[in-house]
Image (cartoon, helix red, strand yellow):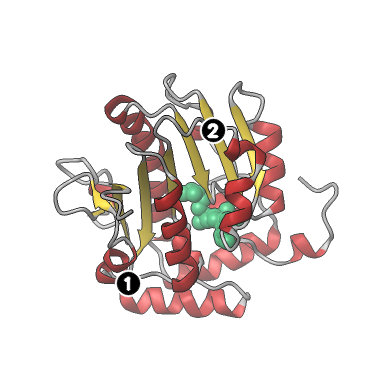
Amino acid sequence: MTSGFPDSYFKRPTVARLQDHLDGGTDNYRPDRDFARGLITVAPWLPASVRVNRAHRPRVLACLARESGINQVIDLGCGLPHDDNHHLPDEVRRMVYVDSDPGVEAQARMVLAERHGTASLRADLEDMSALLAAGPIVQLDRSRPIGVLLHDVLPWIGDETASTVLAALRSWLPAGSVLSVTHATTDVDPESMTALTHLYEEAGIDFRPRSEQQIRDLLTSWAPLEAGGLRTTASWRRSTPMHPRFDHSHAYAIVASPGDRIS
Ligand SMILES: C[S@@+](CC[C@H](N)C(=O)[O-])C[C@H]1O[C@@H](n2cnc3c(N)ncnc32)[C@H](O)[C@@H]1O
């Protein structure tokens, strides 16, 4: 992962590499690991929370494919490839991995794009017009529904951009499409979330966990596919939480459709 990048890229932690380290991956460097130690000190539950979020992805993909007949998916803010990326449901024929981090895009291209129908795109959610006009996105079949994953991405962008991203997706997605969101929350342990936010801020990274109400407000134009909408990620479609000692993932999950359009 080192060739073609300025040295500075490896001297500061990045969100994608931190996530990789917290999830037990090896695509990370000393600044990421050193910084992660401080994060875990103030929030010992963080690695488990990251694992719950990662485990959510294949479950959602299977639901999109089998319940909504979706065979093309955009993974926005996909993060570094992990084992689960290699196990797409057979039904998923086209997968576009999108991230603004050049290291993520390079890894995704190298590791994942070998699979037929898979593409990797470097694009920033701050510029949705450019993102939606990029080749791999334009090549998707908009006469059929599309799945969009926004897993643990909105906490890394501000309210205005998050609203713009969601509005752009809502007007661009064809009927029958489904959006899947996971989002870190301040509801369970506000003190450690505040401590995390401050640590990230010192590293120049804006982290914005939101309350359940704030997440609902962002998604107000979307129609939840399940009654009640938001669930904790660890309990999404489970009768008991996935982690025996971890009944709140410090994050919420929701799947929603663009809903009724006002034309
Ligand atoms: C915490 S990781 C989540 C990765 C993956 N979605 C998951 O659930 O495991 C957040 C990812 O969002 C990406 N990201 C953050 N801001 C972004 C933006 N403005 N545009 C595109 N990607 C962004 C980061 O580079 C990072 O890879």
Residue 21: tell me if it is visible.
no
Above or below, 63 relative to 103: above
Residue type at numbered disc 2: Leu
Residue 3 falls left or right of residue 206: right
Q: Quadrant of the N terminus?
A: top right
Q: Nearer the viewer, mark 2 or mark 1?
A: 2
Above or below, 153 relative to 227: below
**Mark identifier at residue 204:** none
Q: Which of marks 2 and 1 is nearer the N terminus?
A: 2
Front-most of 187 and 34?
A: 187
Q: Where is residue 221 in the image (x, y as percent from the top left)?
A: 29, 59
Residue 7 falls left or right of residue 26: right
Other-residue count near label 1 (Cα within 10 Å), few / some / many at <14 / 14–19 / ≥20:
some
Residue 40 falls left or right of residue 124: left
Which residue is painted at 29% across and 48% down in the image?
256
Residue assigned mark 2: 140
Residue 91 falls left or right of residue 246: right
Mark 2 to mark 1: distance in Å?
Answer: 36 Å
Front-most of 236 and 38?
A: 236
Q: Position of residue 139 (x, y in %)?
A: 59, 32
Front-most of 258 and 72?
A: 258
Helix, strand or loop at label 1? It is loop
**Ligand 1 positioned in quadrant:** bottom right
Q: Where is residue 238 in the image (x, y as percent from the top left)?
A: 20, 40
Which residue is painted at 27% across and 54% down in the image?
246
Which residue is painted at 42% across and 59% down in the image?
167
Helix, strand or loop at label 2? It is loop
Which residue is painted at 63% across and 65% down in the image?
34
Residue type at numbered disc 1: Thr
Residue assigned mark 1: 186
Other-residue count near label 2 (Cα within 10 Å), few / some / many at <14 / 14–19 / ≥20:
some
Front-most of 64 and 19?
A: 64
